[in-house]
Amino acid sequence: MDVQFSNNTFSWILQIAKFDVSPDVVYLVFLTGALIYLFSVLCNGIILTLIVTQRSLHKPMFYIMFSLPLADILGITTILPRLLIDIVTQSNIVYYPTCVLQGFILHTYGTGVLLMLTAMTFDRYIAICKPLRYHTIMTPFTVRGVIALAWGLDFVLITMLFVLQARLPKCKTFIVNVYCDNMSLLQLSCAGDITVNNIYGLLLIGFMQAFCVGTQLLSYIQILKTCLTHSQSEAKIKAVNTCSAQIFTFLLFEIVGITTMLSYRFQNISPNAQKLCGIMTFTIPPVANPIIYGMKTKDIRNTFIMVLKKIKGRLT
């Protein structure tokens, strides 16, 4: 059962921490979690389908936005189904390769959401601050480049994080969290200097916050200036409607992430509460984001209503 990296042989089986649930409410928790998961997949799937099938949404803004619900489905699918199964079966066993894959995807999701929101903010900046040049700047080539840059940078940053972790010899078999992440995998190490890992991890967090927060902040300052100096109120309304969804999504993601980090800094918070905060990072945004974009983005809302009317017309 022990994972030992010696003579190029090791066991793949690890024990993972349990999420303590009273036996009386195990199936209620499972049902609630399953409904949350299905709701998130359904709502994000609807947005993805609308963007793909409806010509009115075939615009640079929505091509870039496509990556956000895609990432949300990937994030919540990676964590919630396996966690719910563990709660019911109480097996709490995970294979090492599966654990690494889960950690890689979850970190890719976390970094990817910030990069996608930054790319979407860039699109809104061009559309509102440079409207006459929008179609000249946001060509299909530019849109593909922005999307490829966001996903490519995400993949490279997280790959490096896990390469640094994988180089260390492993001898422990217990994952201290209810899901696999870089830190819990790092704690499987029995020897080796992790200074480089810690430095890279801090630099990665610092870069992501400085680059993504800084870019969005500067963009929204310029957008606000444009709104205040524009003589037509319709332009201001358009700016608020197109940007508010991204602002709400970004603030929600940051608040949930900061809450999770703070929960591990205070000793008086129970382990179960800390685990719950970590789970919320990968469940609340995927559930809330499609609702936010459905309510705040006029094009998506109108297209969805139009599709529903067409379906209703065919059925009657």
Image (tube, rainbow, N blue to C red):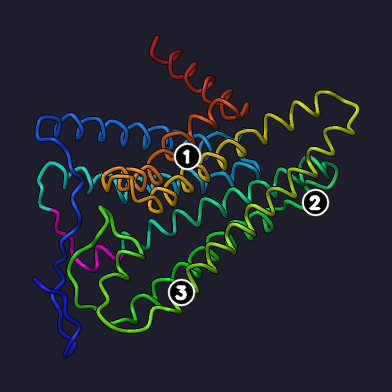
Looking at the rendered image, the quarter that the C terminus falls into is top left
Image spot of residue 263 (x, y percent)? 39, 48
Q: Position of residue 215 (x, y in %)?
A: 69, 54
Mark 1 to mark 2 CA distance (whole Å):
26 Å
Q: Residue at x 12, y 73 (%)?
A: 2
Q: Spot the residue most to the top.
A: 316
Percent position of residue 286, x then y: 42, 40
Tag count: 3
Q: Magenta stretch: residue 256 in it? A: no
Residue drawn where x is 82% and y is 41% of the image:
131
Q: Which mark is residue 136?
A: 2
Task: Please determine whether, in this image, residue 268 is positioned above or below residue 232.
Answer: below
**Which amino acid does the dot numbered 3 rest on?**
Met
Residue wearing tag 3: 160
Q: Is residue 314 above or below residue 71?
A: above
Quadrant assignment, res 295: top right
Q: Earlier in the sequence, mark 1 or mark 2?
A: 1
| Front tag of 3 and 1 | 3
Measured Cα–Cα span from mark 2 to mark 3 = 36 Å
Q: Where does label 1 land, which residue? A: 48
Q: Which residues are magenta?
A: 92-100
Q: Amino acid at mark 2?
A: Thr
Is 12 placed left or right of 312 in the picture?
Answer: left
